[in-house]
Amino acid sequence: MAASTLAERPGLEPEKLSVLVVEDEVLLRVMMADELRSNGLSVIEAANADEALTVLRSSAPVDLLFTDIRMPGSMDGLALAALMRAIKPELKIIVASGQSPRSLSRDIADEFFDKPYNAATVVKRITELLATLEK
């Protein structure tokens, strides 16, 4: 599924596209990371926004941020998404939560998923967003 969607874009190689999965619930993070890897994407995992910021400020390439909203640490997923949108506006961002956010602007995220979400549906949307990248 992902390879064909991304393969339609000349110059985009799925294995060179990277998704940062930020989720404090280990089982959910591992499940999503495994699903993305099985669809040919490179995945970096973080347990909270602080770990994610370390990755995002490094030289590691990240094309899409997939973050939970409610997490321990210095900021939640919405604050992380807003900060990254300001710093790196071309970054694709998807947020997920068991509680709908009071307000979620397209200026902050490209997509929102309620938990529990269907991993295949999320992966499909991730590949759609990645296919819009100019690389």
Image (tube, helix red, strand yellow):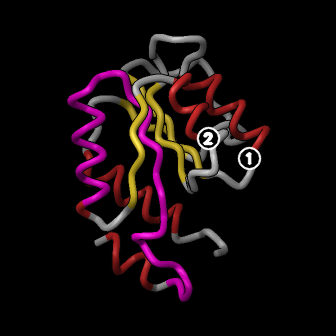
Q: Amino acid at mark 2?
A: Leu
Image x and y of residue 97, in percent: 41, 25
Residues at circles 2 and 1 in contact by the CB criterion of under 8 Å: yes
The residue depicted at 40 percent of the width and 70 percent of the height is 15
Image x and y of residue 10, in percent: 54, 88
Image x and y of residue 8, in percent: 46, 85
Magenta span has 104?
no
Q: Amino acid at mark 1?
A: Lys
Marker disc for residue 56: 2
Look at the image and give the residue range highlighted in magenta. 9-37
The residue depicted at 29 percent of the width and 58 percent of the height is 37
Q: Quadrant of the rendered structure where residue 81 is?
A: top right
Q: Is residue 73 left or right of residue 25?
A: right
Q: Is 20 located above or below residue 135 in the figure?
A: above
The residue depicted at 23 percent of the width and 50 percent of the height is 34
Q: Quadrant of the N terminus?
A: bottom left
Seen from the viewer's position, the closer of residues 92 and 24 is 24
Measure the C-alpha gap from mark 2 to mark 1. Answer: 9 Å
Q: Is 134 located above or below residue 32 in the figure?
A: below
- Mark 2 falls on what kind of element? helix
Closer to viewer: mark 2 or mark 1: 2
Magenta span has 20?
yes
The residue where tag 1 is placed is 88
